[in-house]
Amino acid sequence: MSDGKSLPSAGNTIALLRRFWTFAATHKRWLFLGLSMIPLVVAMSTLRPLMVKYAVDELIPASDIIGLRLLSLGFMVAIMAEFLCQAAQVYALQRAGHTTISDVRRKVFDHVIHLPNSFFDKNALGSLLTRTTSDVEALSETLSFGVFMIISDVVMILSILAAMLWLSPWLTLITLTVAPVLFILVRYVGAVLRRLQLEVRKAQAAQTGFLAEQLAGITVVQLFGREKAAHDEYQRLGQRYLSATKTANWFDALLYAVMDGISAFSVALLIYFAAPSVLTEGGAITLGLLFAFVDYLQRIFIPVKEFSGKLATIQRAAASLERIYGLLDEPTEPIVEDGEPNPLDGWSGGLSVRDLEFAYSEGGPDVLRGLSFDVKPGEVIAVVGRTGSGKSSLGRVLTQFYTGYRGSIQMGEPGSDALELRDVKPRHVRKHLLMVQQDVFLFQDSVAYNICLGESDISGDPQRMMNALELVQARRLIDERGGLEFEVGERGGNLSQGETQLLAFARVAAREPTLLILDEATASVDSITEQKVQQAIEKLLEQRTVLVIAHRLSTVRRADKIMVLRKGEIAEMGSHDELMAKNGLYAELYTMGFEEEEPEQADGAEGTAPDFASP
Amino acid sequence: MGSIRRFLSRYVVPNLPWYGLGFVMLFATNWVIVRIPAIIGEALTILEQQGPNALVGTRSLALELVFLGGLVIVVRSLSRILFFNPGRQVEYRVGVDVFGHLLSLQRPFYMRRKVGELVSIASNDTTSVRLLVGFAALQVCNVAVAIPLHLYQMAVTDLTLTLWCLIPVIFGAIYMQAIVRAFFGMVRESMQMLAGVSDRILEIYSGIGTVRSHAAEAAAFERFDAKNREYLDLQLRIARVRAFSMPVLGFSGLVGTGIVLWVGSLRVVEDGMPVGNLATFTALLMSLVGNLTALAWVLAAVSRGVVSWGRIDTLLETPPELPDERSRLDLDSPPKIELRNLTFHYPDGDEPALCDIDITVNPGKTLGIFGKTGSGKTTLVDVLTRVHTPPESSVFIDGVDTRDVPLSDFRDAMAVVPQAPFLFSTTLRENVRLEGANPYKAARDPQERKGADGDERLHEVLDAACLWDDVEQLPKGLETVVGERGVMLSGGQRQRAALARALYRSKPLLLLDDILSAVDQGTEARMVGAIRQLRGGVGGLAPTTIIVSHRTSVLEHADEIVVLEGGRIVERGTHDELVAAGGEYAQTHEHQGGEGA
């Protein structure tokens, strides 16, 4: 609740709305259609009482039956036209509003998925979700109702006022003497009501928040015998909400009822003051004029009541807009345009790393400290080391999950046409350099979707997916489950951990990356699946350039070269036998069975994350 | 129907006097509302007939209008308050009853239901019920009074005209009923769809690492946009209904006024009907249409309220499923814990989760439970703490079947640190003390408890839990708000805070469920030492302690260790005996760093 829900100033609001126009401009045709209907609707609705006036003043006294018939028909036509114009207005404006909102949501979403990883480290998913959903929805309310309703109400009031002044300035002034009273009342009661409603919302949020948290921690509440305390507290919060709403009800009821009273007062004034000057025939004030006034006076006050409420909606929307723009102003990773050639096409998979240094934050401690090594095409290199040695960080730097490394990472044969990693756009890099992370994420969709991830060049080719499953020895397993169309469930809940691993490998196999960075998972799976996973990894290592962050002895044995990291530096490098003979860090790690990494460290800035991260 | 009766007797009947008074106010309101157009019509007629000489006749009418205007403000305000405030009262009572009941329900219930769903019942459904007894009750009563009064006033003014102008309005009202129903269906669908869009967005944001490493951003966007477009389509359909169908009833009222003009003006000319009647009719008709519109909306509120109440009632009628209380429990020294042939099934499980468990822990002794993930460790703790009710005659505390004692007595005797530590969004102090654990209260008056009696004790237990140094780093020390809405603590810190919470209580029975899983080895050693020391030092008597872990170093000092596998005890003995036996325990011990870690 503390994330800046204060309302922006009026000037700021206008600046925000102007910026917002860039979204709305795409749909301006509907917008203009809707707006152009407003004067028509208003004209028809102002005209109706004038028609009645004509009937009362001219046609009825003259007993002009034909004229009355014609006038009644005209009246019906005017009603019909008003209905149609109004429907068109509402539809066009809502359409413009909803499509604009939809565009905003698309834009926000697209922006978020292109934000750098460091942004996701700093921001809770919940608040990003709020930006993309509730904040956008708040705009919707304003766009579809608030702004245009105000315009239409104002035009209506002005038009009725004009008609009244034209008919009789004197009567208009007299009957509208109640207006200031109404205005002051609405302003005062409205202001009180807004304060109360704020309190109501706060009280409600407090109550719901408390409830949700107590239920989430129900075990603690019950184990520690806090039921009574929790119940009392909930009751106290409920009382706060109750008394706020009850007070609000008083003011709300008053505001609502005042409208009925006010129009009765104004009509009383009309009748009282008009009577002496009514001249039924040809005078300044006619009976028909009174008819028209009665009608106008019953309608002119109605919009006033909701005015302040609508203004508040706009202010809330401006606050949402401010938050949305705050997000949209965050710089994204370099975007790849459609059809932009990938400079890495044809890359052999070779890497040449020199003096690589890296820190997660500027001025923070280096987690990689002067690494230099080569990866030759087709080579399998195992990276081992303790937690915090920099293994995972290396993978994240190479895939440009984090930027800002020092030193050089040359892609390709050293010399002529090698590219420096930082000069290549992240998406181009990741098309060729694929990292499989420890924690596999599955989408709530079919096996097929989880292999292709929606990419049409793979999804259009089931054979390719089957081959990929075959390669990682998962085809039988998946077939038993029901094939490519099998639904994996929420977060892959229908699959076992081992199967989830295999599916992640199939994802890789279907993409055939030039260089694969494989962060072996340490999560325990049963021994049969473990065997399958091992076999799958071995298959993946065949005929491919791979940098594997290894936890399994079998994987390390299979590597051409082993790189042992300690505190961000290369402690040892060589083949298994060489390193064992050295009897150093590698030998120590080997005998301990490559002690697992804490799963919690899988994400975020390993080794550098402060114990207390601000939310 | 039983559920409706329960609702009426529990919540509505106590408010009946208010409703009765409200009904009287409603009648008065509507009487005034139909009188006002009639007076206006009369005044216009007098003006027409008497011209400038009408002053005498109209002055009294004008004064009457002012009086009625004032009256309507009072009676209408009161009628709304008299209906709405009891509605709020009911909302409050239902909410409190629901929460109270939820607190009494046990784990088997929470395994079946999601927290989000329960929160929605306690908040959204109570709101629907409030609308039912407040807004809906008001509108139904209002319409019941208003429609007859309007029709009566119209009929006494001019019966023929009444019949004529009602024709379009009746059709409009029927159409509106159908549309409102369809409209609510669409609105419900759109809320579900919006939830679907949110789920998609959250899913992709959570899996952003995967999307990114496979360079599948474009496809991810398409995955989101498919739902987004679907939602937009529905919104546009709703907009169509809103634009073209919803105003039909109002439009039919306008058509009615057109008929008033057509038929009425002829009657004025031919039958000498007073011309003021035209104004009376127009105003009455518009007011009637307003009432009919409200009726259409209200019927939807009624059906929603009834469905919501159904959900609430089902929840309130769910029994807590606690065994009968047969004896009390009041411990003043560490108890003896016995498990006799404990076999436990989950409500929906075929295989027993625990099988033939036989353990005795003597007063003040420590039992270690060792096992891998899925071996039944946590189930055993849950049964010991009665999070799951154990079967009869299988768990005894000082010779009494734990089933037979009131849950509150039983829980009062123990301090438990569950496996997944839960911190409330309140200060660290409140989280350890756990008085009301209310974030909002703590945030408001941080001074209230500062320096209170327990601070020395707090310091002691936080030290024992190896959290004191961390506390000193926190921006506001013990007053720092932690949990979801505050400073995020690391997994290890959360575990240590939960441990401090249990130690703070110094109960005769202490259960620690795998609490050191997220702490590094060095801290672990310090904590084990501290727990041992604290047990020996505080209050003289060491509590009977049960420690669960998958790390042998934590269990080393236990008086007995049982090794669980597949819900059965496969090995038992002291640490040294088990290491010597060379089984699963010994292997793990060696793997985890061997001798004297």
Image (cartoon, coloured by chain):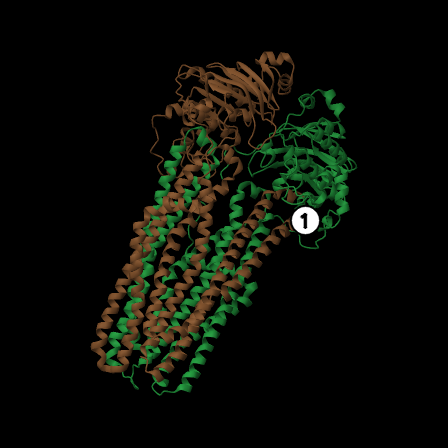
Closer-to-camera residue (B160/B532)? B160
Closer-to-camera residue (B62/A142)? B62
- The residue that disc 1 covers is A454
In the shown orientation, is residue B242 left or right of residue B588?
Answer: left
Residue A14 image point, x, y percent: 45, 60
Residue A518 image point, x, y percent: 69, 36
Residue B316 image point, x, y percent: 44, 40
In the shown orientation, is residue A416 left or right of residue B474?
Answer: right
Using the rendered view, name the quadrant where residue A563 is placed.
Answer: top right
**Does B221 appear above or below A477?**
below
Closer-to-camera residue (A63/A221)? A63
**Does A100 appear above or below B447?**
below
Q: Residue at x 26, y 82 (%)?
A: B49
Residue type beneath disc 1: Gly
Chain rendered brown:
B
Residue B457 image point, x, y percent: 39, 23
- At mark 1, the secondary structure is loop
Chain rendered green:
A
Question: Is residue B321 at all visible to an observer of this figure?
Answer: yes
Chain for numbered disc 1: A
In the shown orientation, is residue B158 left or right of residue A87?
Answer: left
Q: Residue furthest left?
A: B56
